[in-house]
Each structure stands twice: as C-alpha cells, then as structure tokens.
Image (cartoon, rainbow, N blue to C red):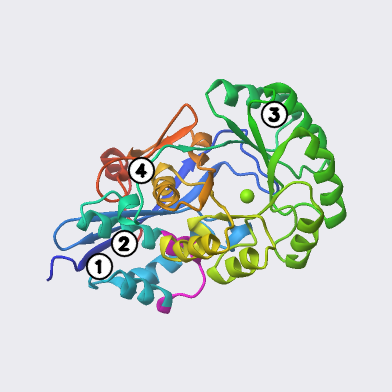
Amino acid sequence: MEKNNIAAIRIYAFDIPLRADFNISGSRDGFANNVLVSIETADGRVGWGEASPVSRVTGETQTTCLAAAKKIKAALAGRDAAKLSSCLAAMHRAVAGNPTIKSAFDIALFDLAAQHAALPLCEFLGGRAKPLPTDATIFLRPLDRVIESARNIAAAGFKTIKLKLGHPSRDDIERVRVVRDAVGTKIKLRADANQYWSRDYALQTLKAIAKFHVEFCEQPLPARDRAGLRWLGERSPIPLVADESLFTPRDARRLAIEKWADILNIKLCKSGGLHGALPIARIAAGANTPCMTGCMNESRLGLTAAAHFAAAMDIVKFYDLDSFLMHTADWIEGGLQICAGKVLLPRAPGLGAKPSDRWLAKHKPVR
Ligand SMILES: [Mg+2]
C-alpha cells in the first residue's frame, strides 16, 4: 500500500455534557451530541475532524451523521488521501446533502494534507496564525442571569459579547439594554435572533436597539424568507448577518453580490467543511462583504479547524469561536486556547488537535 493511502477510518459518537444554563432560541439540550472522525494513512499519520449537528439548521442529528458517516467511510476506504479533491468528490458522490458530517471528513483530510506539508493548517491554507478576538455568547436566560453573565464575560477579558435574542416573552429590547448597562460602552455588543422574528417585529426591534450601539444582528428572519432579509436590510439601522441563510457558494453569491446581507457567517458545519468554506470566503472577498466565522457546538477540536480557516482568510473579520466554554468536560489535547478573549492557535503541523489518549482508551469506534 502507498504511504498516503487511507488504511483506516474510525467514527466515534462524541457526547459532551453542557452547562445547565445552555439555551438558545428553540433548543434545550443536556449534551452536545457530536461525532468524531479519524482517518489514518498507511504511513501512520492520523487526521481528525468533528461534526456538531444542529438539526434545526442542517436537518442532521448524531444518528443521521453516524449513518451517513458509514457510507462515506466505505467510499473513502483505500483512496489516496493526498488526492484531496478526488477524496472529497467521492464523498459527495456517496452522500448528498449532510454538510455537517461531511465537514468532519473534510477537516480530517485537510489535517492529513497539512501534516504531509509539515505546515499548521492556517499556513497550508495560505495564511498565518494570528490572535483572533472572539466574542463570548449569552444565551436566552432570565434577565438577572444575563446581567451576571455579561459582567463575568467582561471580567474574563472578552471585548465583545454576543447576545442571543428571540425569547418568547419578547423582551429583546430590555435584554440589550441591561447588558449595555452592565458592561458600559467599552465592550462591543452583537445580537443573534436565530430566525425568530417576523419582518415588522424585526424592524421595530432593530430601530429600538440601535441606540445601544449594537455592532450587527445575525439572522433576524427565517432562512426561507430571503426576500425579507433584503427588505429588512434596506431599512435596518444595524448591519445584518446571514447565518442560517448561508450554506453554499451559491447562497454566498446571492447574499454578497446582490447585497442581501452586510456580513456572511461561515460555519464549517454548514459549508461541508473547508472545501465549501473557501469559495464562500473568496466570493465574499470579491464582493467586499466581510465574513464572520462561527460555530455550532463543537469541542476545541472542531473549533480549531474553524480558527485555522478564520486566521487564513483576510475577509474573515469577526470571530465567534466560543462553544466549548459551555462544555463541562474537555477531552481535547492541543488545539486552540482562549486567553483574555483572544483565540490562540496551536503551532503543530496540521490541525494540531486530537482527543486525549484517555478518552480514546474509554471509547470504541462505532461499527
Ligand atoms: Mg447565528
């Protein structure tokens, strides 16, 4: 067997306990039910990737990810991992859709390719490691807890807070007001309504919260209301970010070139990994539309891939790479760290992150 040939693929269910107060609009979960994938080549290199399915965004769950992963595994077995594009094409032929589980395989293949080139992934992608100032997120909690979180985030050195809006009690304006009051004017504040608003309610709310200096608002309207996003964008005093509306380069073309959104939020779990994310960033750069790199509910492993991508792409100007702060266990070795609100990348070749030997000793791959 040639040294670059894929000798083994392992798929693991990866269940991470969440802090009890985790809640975004429309979901309430005790665990991040993720999937880890490792791809080993004949010369003993191992690439790692993570999928963090959020069904209300991509329609995928851990169960569907595991089922699709088995088909992708069969399609990749024995292939030359150095032929990255043909491996990815084989994956897309084997399974349509399913961008989240595909992202795990894509990241593992890029990890192998960057290891082979003896470069950290961000350099393999043509960029350089740099500290990335990330926000920290406040979820839909009671107002007194929102205030407490805002103070804790500012005290931990973060310069930006991302506030989830869209609570059924419709107290969005009050949420923004109490956070601004709690942290003063030196902290940036961004909002995310996760598709929960109607057009009229969104316009009214955006006009009302503009006085609290909100940097931008993510996905005010349902993803299916594309025309609504454009309508709102023409009227909103606050820049709008497409998140759940953006999956593919085709979406990016419409959103960026036709100016349906001011900013694009790229997530590897939506784009099918780096191979889909790179053309989105290029399209955005061509249209002079800044990007954000966000996350689902990844551990530091999946987040490290997103951070390498964000560091490599100059058009990515905003960073939301904080999901692991909501986890009560961390089984990743290497990987990114957050220090005083800044994401720091590992310097090792490849992704530079893997699950610990202790975790691996206790968990068997799925059959
Ligand atoms: Mg969002």
| Magenta-colored span | 93-103
Q: Residue at x 50, y 57 (%)?
A: 269
- Cβ atoms under marks 1 and 2 closer than 8 Å: yes
- Cβ atoms under marks 2 and 4 closer than 8 Å: no
Question: What amino acid is at disc 1?
Answer: Ala
Query: Label 4: which residue?
Result: 129
- CA–CA distance between discs 4 and 3? 33 Å
Query: Label 3: which residue?
Result: 146
**Mark 4 or mark 3: whose residue is earlier in sequence:** 4
**Mark 1 or mark 3: whose residue is earlier in sequence:** 1
**Mark 1 or mark 2: whose residue is earlier in sequence:** 1
- CA–CA distance between discs 1 and 2? 7 Å
**Under tag 1, what secondary structure?**
loop
The verdict on residue 351 being magenta is no
Which labelled disc corresponds to residue 288? none
Query: Label 1: which residue?
Result: 81
Query: Label 2: which residue?
Result: 109
- CA–CA distance between discs 4 and 1? 25 Å
